[in-house]
C-alpha cells in the first residue's frame, strides 16, 4: 500500500505539479510576445511520464497468468521520461531567452522519440508489452469499432456546429472544406501520426492506463471516470489562458472541462471495452487532427462567445454522457 501511495504521489506531482510550473513560464512567453505553440505539445507527454516515473519509483513488476514475473520495460520508460525532461528544460530556457530555437529542438525531439519509441515497442517482447499496457495488437475488432464510432460522433458534432452557426446567423467560413483535403488525409495525417504518436500516447497512457483504474477502484466506475474528466479538463487551464483562447479564457475553460468530461466518458468506455491504450491514442490523435484535415482549422486563438459556449457544452454532454449507462460502466453488484 505504501508503495502504491508513493507511486500515486509521484504521478500527481509530475502530471499536475509540472503544468503549474510550466504555466508560469508559458505566461512569461505569452506576455513577452513569444510563440507558446510548443507548450501544449510538451504538456501531452507529462501524464505518461508521470505514470512511468511512478512505476520506476515503485519498482513495479507484473506477473503473467502462470505467476511468472515480467520486468518493466525500463528502456522504453527511461527513454520517454528523459526526452520529456529535456523538452521541459528547453521550454523553460526558451521562455527566458530570445528567439524560438527551443521550439525547433522540441519538434525534433518529438519526431525522434516517436521513431525510437516505435522501434523499441516493435523489438519489445510480446508478453512485456501486454503486461504493461503496451500491446500493439489487442482486441482489434472492438478497437476499430471504437475508432469508427468516434469518427461518426465527431462528424455529428461538426454537423450540429454548422446548424448552430446557421441558426445564430453566423458565418460558415470556419466550416469551409480544406482545398487540400485529400493530400492532408492521405499524406499529412499518416506522416503526422508516425512522427508524433508519442504525444497522444503521452496523455492516454497516463489518463486511461494509469489514473482511470486508480480512480474507478476508489470511487466506482462512473464517479471515477467523471472525476478523471474534471481533472483532465482543469489540467488544460494554462493552455486555455495563453494558447486556446486568451481573449475569452473563461468560456474556453468551461468548454474544456465539459469536453473532457464528455470525451473522458467515451475514451474510458473504449478503454474498458478494449484494454487497448493504442485505440484511445488513435482516437485522441483524430480528435486533435481532423479539424485541420477537414477545415484547416487551428485550436489556437479561438474567440468564444457565450451562446456557442453554452451550446457546445450541452452538445458535448448530450453526445457522450449516455455512454455512462453502457454495461462497461456497471458495477459488479449492478449486474
Image: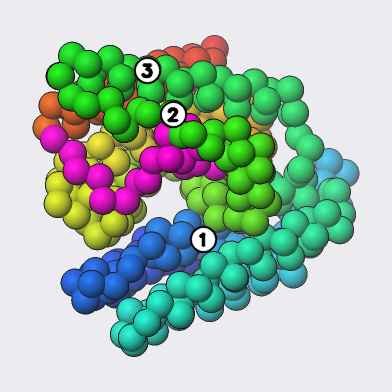
Report crowding for label 3: few under 14, some 14 to 19, many 20 or more residues within 10 A (C-alpha): few
Q: Residue at x 83, y 54 (%)?
A: 122
Report crowding for label 1: few under 14, some 14 to 19, many 20 or more residues within 10 A (C-alpha): many
- Looking at the image, what colour scheme do you see? rainbow
Q: Nearer the viewer, residue 134 or 24?
A: 24
Q: Which mark is residue 127?
A: none
Alpha-carbon span between mark 3 and mark 2: 13 Å
Q: Residue at x 19, y 54 (%)?
A: 246
120 lies above or below 187: below
Report crowding for label 2: few under 14, some 14 to 19, many 20 or more residues within 10 A (C-alpha): some
Q: Position of residue 285 (x, y in %)?
A: 54, 42
Q: Position of residue 87 (x, y in %)?
A: 50, 74
Q: Residue tagged by mark 3?
A: 159
Q: Are marks 1 and 2 in contact (CB under 8 Å)?
A: no
193 lies above or below 144: below
Q: Residue tagged by mark 1?
A: 45
**Magenta residues (range):** 285-305
Q: Are marks 3 and 2 in contact (CB under 8 Å)?
A: no
Q: Quadrant of the C terminus?
A: top right
Q: Residue tagged by mark 2?
A: 177
Q: Nearer the viewer, residue 196 or 8?
A: 196
Q: Quadrant of residue 164?
A: top left
Q: Is residue 318 left or right of residue 46?
A: left
Per the image, label 3 sits on a secondary structure element best described as: helix
Per the image, label 1 sits on a secondary structure element best described as: loop
Alpha-carbon span between mark 3 and mark 1: 32 Å
Amino acid at each position: 500500500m505504501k508503495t502504491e501511495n508513493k507511486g500515486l504521489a509521484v504521478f500527481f506531482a509530475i502530471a499536475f505539479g509540472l503544468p503549474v510550473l510550466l504555466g508560469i513560464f508559458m505566461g512569461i512567453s505569452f506576455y513577452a510576445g513569444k510563440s507558446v505553440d510548443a507548450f501544449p505539445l510538451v504538456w501531452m507527454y507529462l501524464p505518461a511520464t508521470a505514470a512511468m516515473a511512478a512505476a520506476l519509483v515503485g519498482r513495479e513488476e507484473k506477473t503473467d497468468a502462470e505467476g511468472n514475473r515480467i520486468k518493466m520495460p525500463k528502456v522504453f520508460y527511461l527513454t520517454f521520461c528523459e526526452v520529456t525532461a529535456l523538452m521541459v528544460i528547453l521550454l523553460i530556457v526558451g521562455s527566458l531567452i530570445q528567439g524560438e530555437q527551443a521550439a525547433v529542438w522540441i519538434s525534433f525531439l518529438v519526431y525522434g522519440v516517436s521513431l525510437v519509441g516505435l522501434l523499441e515497442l516493435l523489438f519489445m517482447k510480446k508478453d512485456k508489452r501486454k503486461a504493461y499496457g503496451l500491446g500493439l495488437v489487442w482486441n482489434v475488432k472492438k478497437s476499430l469499432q471504437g475508432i469508427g464510432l468516434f469518427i461518426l460522433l465527431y462528424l455529428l458534432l461538426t454537423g450540429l456546429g454548422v446548424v448552430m452557426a446557421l441558426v445564430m446567423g453566423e458565418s460558415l467560413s470556419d466550416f469551409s472544406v480544406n482545398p487540400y483535403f485529400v493530400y492532408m488525409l492521405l499524406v499529412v495525417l499518416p506522416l503526422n501520426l508516425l512522427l508524433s504518436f508519442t504525444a497522444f500516447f503521452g496523455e492516454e497512457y497516463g489518463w486511461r492506463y494509469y489514473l482511470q483504474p486508480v480512480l474507478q477502484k476508489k470511487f466506482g466506475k462512473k464517479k471515477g471516470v467523471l472525476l478523471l474528466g474534471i481533472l483532465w479538463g482543469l489540467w488544460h487551464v494554462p493552455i486555455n489562458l495563453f494558447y486556446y483562447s486568451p481573449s475569452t479564457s473563461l468560456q474556453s475553460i468551461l468548454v474544456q472541462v465539459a469536453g473532457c468530461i464528455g470525451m473522458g466518458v467515451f475514451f474510458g468506455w473504449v478503454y474498458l471495452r478494449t484494454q487497448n491504450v493504442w485505440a484511445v491514442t488513435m482516437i485522441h490523435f483524430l480528435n486533435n487532427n481532423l479539424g485541420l484535415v477537414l477545415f484547416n482549422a487551428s485550436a489556437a486563438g479561438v474567440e468564444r462567445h457565450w451562446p456557442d459556449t453554452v451550446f457546445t457544452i450541452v452538445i458535448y454532454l448530450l453526445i457522450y454522457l449516455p455512454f455512462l449507462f453502457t454495461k462497461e460502466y456497471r458495477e459488479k453488484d449492478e449486474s
